Image (spheres, grey):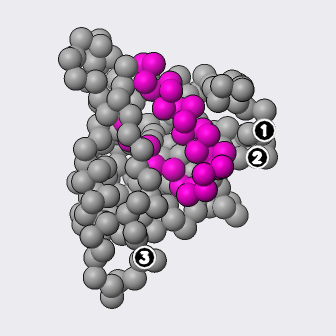
Amino acid sequence: MPESDFMSSSTPPVIGFICGSLREGSINKRLEKALVKRFKRAGAKTTSINLAAYDLPLYHGDLDMPAGVKKLVRKIKSCDGVVVVSPEYNGGLPPVLKNAIDWTSTTGKAHFETPYWGIASCTPGPMSGIMCMRQVNYILMRLGAHVSPIQVGVGKAQVAFDSQGELIAEPSATLAESLIKDMLAQI
């Protein structure tokens, strides 16, 4: 939907957020909250997709599909867009995120193909999660997802946010605005 059509639409798009960290004090949860504020200011509705709420055991092909998988897929399908905000663990994506992707991919690909996807990462060091974002992008695209070419990498997390939790580091703040504009224009 072109941005002008979105602005005249009576129903704001719903953007879901999946954080690849389950830790409450996570810098990626902080980035998620900052992005939620920005999406809301742009007119979108937001919803958190907390992976801890879906009780997903470690993926194993011999296990019966847990009820949480279908519940998670329904939640993803209810969104017009989904932003994955993930830490980088040892140069890759965290196991909880990969496990959720693996489980949900067993139900088909429609929930990957329907929403428009965004990717963001926050790290304490200067590299801003680039390796994790690259891997998440690759996996989502292999599953048929339409992924924004704009990714929000935030390095040096200790100075990236102000006291109100707003993302202030550049170029990350500008990338966040560009991601929002792109996602809302594609929905």
Q: Name the residue under label 3.
A: 57
From the top left corner, tell me how far across and down residue 172 is, in percent: 65, 29
* Label 2 secondary element: loop
Kind of residue at disc 1: Gln
The question of residue 125 being in magenta is answered with no
Classify residue 128 as left or right of residue 11.
Answer: right
Look at the picture and state if 83 lies above or below 163.
below
Between the C-alphas of marks 1 and 2, the distance is: 7 Å
Q: What residue is at 44 percent from the left and 58 percent from the top? A: 51
The span shown in magenta is 15-42
Mark pair 3, 1: CA separation:
33 Å
Given contact means CB atoms under 8 Å apart, are the residues at marks 1 and 2 in contact?
yes
Residue lying at 78% horizontally and 32% vertically, measured from the top left? 159
Q: Residue furthest left?
A: 10
Residue beneath label 1, please? 158
Secondary structure type for disc 1? helix
Q: Mark 2 points at which residue?
A: 124
Q: Residues within 10 Å of mark 3 (few under 14, many from 20)?
A: some
Between discs 2 and 3, the one toward the N terminus = 3
Could you say which quadrant of the image residue 135 lies in?
A: bottom right
